[in-house]
Image: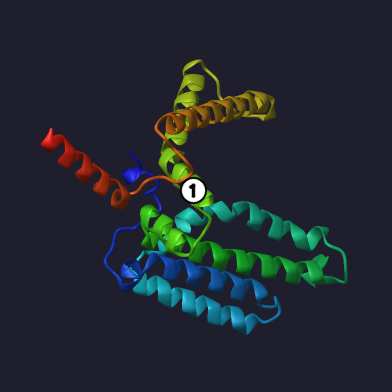
Amino acid sequence: MGADHGHRLHFHAHSPLHSAPSHAKILALVAWVLLVVATPAHWFWAFGVHAVVLALAIGVSRVPVTYLLKRAVVETPFVVFAVLLPFIATGERIDVLGVAVSGPGLLAAWGLLVKGTLGVLASLLLAATTEPQDLLLGLQRLRVPQQLVQIMAFMIRYLDVVTDELQRMRVARESRGFTARDPRQWPVLARTFGALFIRSYERGERVHLAMLARGYTGSIPTEATRRPVTAHAHIHGSRR
C-alpha cells in the first residue's frame, strides 16, 4: 500500500548521492544543519562556503535546481518574517535605500533567511535523492525509537490519502458555488480543516484497532520476519 506514497519529492536519477546509504545521508544532513545554524550571522564568507558546498552536492546529485526551488515554497513563512524583522526589531537604526531599519534586526533577518534557505534546500536534496522507504530504513539503522519510525511510516502512507480527501472537499465546496475570496469565508475553511482533522483522527483509530486485531504488539513485522513464518506454515501445510 505504501510503496508509491510519499514519492512526490523524490527525483529519479542515477548518481553517487542517490546510491549512498540512507543513514549516512541522514547523518550528513544533521551535521550540515548543525554547522549552518552554529555559524554566526556576520560570518558572510562562511555562508558563501556553505553555499558552494551545497551547490556541489546538488550538481553531483543531478537534481535540477528548479526542481528544488519549486518545492522550497515551504520556506515562505520564514521569508515573510525575515522581511518584517528589520522593521519591527529594536536597536540602532540605519538607512537602507532611504528607509530606516533596525541594524540588529537586519543582521538577524539575514541570518534567519540564509540559514533557513540552506537548511531547506539540503533537506529537499535528501528527499529528492532518497526513497521514503530508504529513509525509514536509515532511521532504523540509526537506532531511532521504533515508535517514531512507525509514526513516520504511517505519515508517508496516508499523506496522499489525506491530500486527496482535502481535494474532494474543495471540489464539493466549489460545486455548491463557494469561493474563498475574502476573510468572511475563513470560518468555512476553518470548519473544513476541522472536519478533515476529525476524519483523519478517526481513520487513525480504525487503523490502530485493525492492527491490534491482527496481533500488533508494538513493532511491525518486516519481510525478513514474515518469510520464515510463511515457509514454516507452508511446510506444515504440505505435511498435512
The answer to whether 224 appears left or right of 187 in the picture is left
Q: How is the image coloured?
A: rainbow
Hey, which quadrant is residue 83 in on the image? Answer: bottom right
Question: Looking at the image, which residue is at 47% across and 47% down?
Answer: 150
User: Residue 216 at what x, y percent from top left?
Assistant: 44, 38
User: Residue 103 at what x, y percent from top left?
Assistant: 81, 71
Residue nearest the viewer, comparing 170 with 164:
164
| SS at circle 1 | helix
Name the image quarter holding the N terminus: top left
The answer to whether 131 appears left or right of 102 in the picture is left
Q: Is residue 54 above or below residue 170?
A: below
Residue placed furthest toward the top:
176
Question: Looking at the image, which residue is at 88% across and 69% down?
Answer: 91
**From where the camera sits, is residue 19 visible?**
yes
Q: How many marks?
A: 1
Q: Is residue 195 above or below residue 116?
A: above
Residue nearest the viewer, comparing 64 with 100:
64
User: Residue 93 at what x, y percent from top left?
Assistant: 86, 70
Residue placed furthest toward the front:
239
**From where the camera sits, is residue 97 visible?**
no
Question: Looking at the image, which residue is at 54% across and 82% down?
Answer: 49
Disc 1 crowd, CA 10 A, few/some/many (<14, 14-19, 20+) = some
Q: Is residue 26 above or below residue 233?
A: below
Mark 1: amino acid: Met
Q: Which residue is mark 1?
A: 152
Residue nearest the viewer, comparing 97 with 132:
132
The answer to whether 108 appears left or right of 227 in the picture is right
Question: Looking at the image, which residue is at 42% across and 62% down?
Answer: 138
Name the image quarter holding the C terminus: top left
